[in-house]
Image: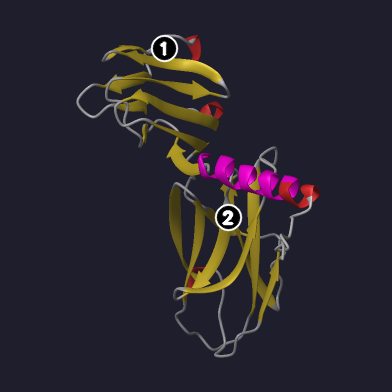
Amino acid sequence: MGRCVSRVPRHHLILLFLFLSVIFSSAGESSVQDLIGAVGDSVTFPISIPVSGSLMYKAITVGQVFNKQSDTELSEKFVNRLQWVSQSGFFTLSDLRTDDSGLYTVESTKEQKGKQDYQLEVYKRVSAPQVMNSASSSSEFCSFLCSVRNVRGLKLSLHEDGVLLNDTSSSDTSDITLNLHLEIKKTNNHRERTFSCVASNPVSDKTTSINITHYCSLNTGKHMRFCL
């Protein structure tokens, strides 16, 4: 008596093959790692090239290492700023500029073979916020303006004794400044309250302390109005 042998349909085998191909090809790909730098600082790409390999910027080779000999002047953009350190095998980019932001790929082709993509974002440091009386002050409310020069990634916030009161941010660096207003109701009851205005982005932060009694008289209740 013959035995029955079940056969897997051909189209099922094709689908299984395609699925396994995607799995194995994805396993060989490296995910993009984020790097952050400040204008004027330096950044080191943390994958070693001990013998031979390359550094690419936006798919163009800008640094080359062959048998422990480097050439870091392949791109005029990075001349005198890109270095390869033989002791560590790391590429380092110094005197960072905002237009250095972009996708970099480091690949080691001999000994410790490996490849890694890095998304570098370079930011200007923020300046200290300026505080001034606002023209919207009245007999009922006193008002002040917190202002800072706009840079990429900027966030401006107001705090009372470390507690966040209000904040704002802008993705458009064409704006010259970023502003926050605070209005407080005037009364005859004086109470010392310390406020601060904080400017921050991924690479820096600056705080300006504000003594509200220099601007107005306060009551014990919190009668505040915020506007951008």
The foreground one among 36 and 33 is 33
Q: Where is residue 173 in the image (x, y as percent from the top left)?
A: 66, 40
**Disc 1 residue type?**
Val
Q: Earlier in the sequence, mark 2 or mark 1?
A: 1
Say if 27 sits above or below 218 in the image: above
| Residue kind at label 2, given as amino acid type | Lys
Residue 221 painted magenta: no
Checking the image for residue 126, the label placed there is none
Q: What element carries label 2?
A: strand
Foreground residue among 159 and 117: 117
The outermost residue toward the front is 1
* Disc 2: which residue: 155
Depth check, mark 2 against mark 1: the one in front is 1
| Residue 66 in the figure: left or right of residue 38 | left
Q: What stretch is highlighted in magenta?
A: 14-30
- Location of mark 1 (residue): 79
Q: Which colour scheme is used?
A: secondary structure
Determine the image quadrant of residue 155.
bottom right
> Can the viewer see residue 126?
yes
At numbered mark 1, what does the secondary structure look like: helix, strand or loop? loop
Mark 1: give few (<14), some (14-19) or many (20+) Cα within 10 Å: few
Q: How many marks?
A: 2
Q: Does the magenta stretch include residue 28?
A: yes
